[in-house]
Image (cartoon, rainbow, N blue to C red):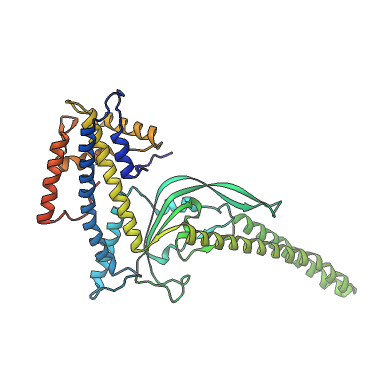
Amino acid sequence: MLREHYIPIRVADLIGYLCAESGPLRAQALTAAERTAFRRFARTVVSHVHTIYQAEIRQLKDAYAAFDPDADPKPLDPPTGEKRQAALDRLFDTFVHLMRRANYRRLARDEMEQIMRGASAWGVDMDVAWDAFEKVEVFYRGKGTGKRTKYGLVRFWRKYSVEVPTFARAAVIFKMRPHKRLGDDVDTHSVVLKLFKNMPQIDIEMLLPGGRIRMPKFDRLKIGGSLTSSAAYILWKFSTISLSLVGGFATSTLFALYTPLALLGGYGYKMWYTFRSSRQSYLHQLQQSLYFQNLDNNSGVMFRLLDEAEEQEMRESLLAYFYLWRYGGETGWGTEELDFYIEQDLKKRLPADVNFEIIDALVKLMRNGLVVKTDDRYKAIPINEAQAKLNAIWEGYARTGPPQGLPEG
């Protein structure tokens, strides 16, 4: 299974367990003074990162205001024409970057179609109208399995559990265009954002409007074969009727058509009822998604994702600095040593099989002067010096404001 970059631990809990860390030699626990210094350093890092992301929240709110269906109040001078299209492109580009910072993975259209191929555990197969979207992007974070209940085919009165592959988080952003599947009242001016939890992978198409239930191919083949054979039989019988009329046996021959017609009608009803049941299953699952799996919508999605990206950056920075500071020594550590130790420690403590973004974390620390590189080894500066550097950066924010734009990574 592909390992995730996401570190599933709250920042407050992370600081607590780092302060209790005993190190590779099991005899390197922090002293009371060191714990106090590290907690102060961690609080400053948290404030530093939060300030940068607060500035980004304001920029995103301004970028989304013209496209937010829930905006209240509306912008006084929304962009039009080419300016609106440019603003739309910037919004999507910014959102893609935000999702990467929050450790979400982007699903290309061909990947989505591969995932959506076939019917789900509820017997539902959907056809997505891709041409109903002017722009659409889908993201996920975390793959796992979940349990769902369904009724049996034989003992239809009994429920049983099925295990289905899931996405821990699934997010969509899209702008619609006029389309026959959407009706006349669809909002084609706004950009819609939605965030879901524990979404079955094969039902990811349920998150996109304009989908249509498609009868499974095997059922279509069965109906087509039955229709063809029944029609051929009826035509053959009709050809014999013309001969029988001459011989005076029309009544008995017409009566002979009753059997294939009744069979055809009964089979057609059965298939229609099965398809109708699948449709009801789809509507039920859609209701579950909208009411119980939906985490946030529109601007709320932006704020939640920014908070996740902010927390992730705090975790990465604190982990990389701490292990270099405590255990790197005078010579420092190479990226492979540092990466291996952090990943093994997280796996032991959480447990979580995390693919730690070591280069990303080191770049951020070096950018602020908290880590120095010599040849291919990295060394953390003493914590008192690191605290002084962060204090100086904080004073710079008071004079000129925080940097604009999400950190690269």
Residue 147 image point, x, y percent: 55, 48
Q: Say above or below: 146 vs 330.
A: below
Residue situated furthest right in the rendering = 248
Q: Dividing the image into 4 quarters, which one contains the N terminus?
A: top left
Question: Residue placed at 31% from the left, 30% from the top?
Answer: 341
Q: Say above or below: 239 vs 27.
A: below
Residue 100 image point, x, y percent: 31, 50
Question: Residue placed at 31% from the left, 53% from the top?
Answer: 307
Asked if residue 17 shows in the view, the reply is: yes
Residue 95 image point, x, y percent: 30, 57
Q: Which of 89 and 258 is in front in this view?
A: 89
Asked if residue 257 shows in the view, the reply is: no
Residue situated furthest left in the rendering = 399
Q: In which quarter of the image is residue 280?
A: bottom right
Q: Say above or below: 361 vs 49.
A: above
* Count of number-bearing discs: 0
Q: Nearer the viewer, residue 383 or 328?
A: 383
Question: Residue placed at 25% from the left, 40% from the top?
Answer: 318
Question: Residue placed at 54% from the left, 59% from the top?
Answer: 285
Q: Quadrant of residue 306?
A: bottom left
Q: Which of 229 and 93 is in front in this view?
A: 93
Residue 396 image point, x, y percent: 10, 51
Q: In this view, does 384 lie to the left or right of 70?
A: left
Q: In this view, does 24 lie to the left or right of 145?
A: left
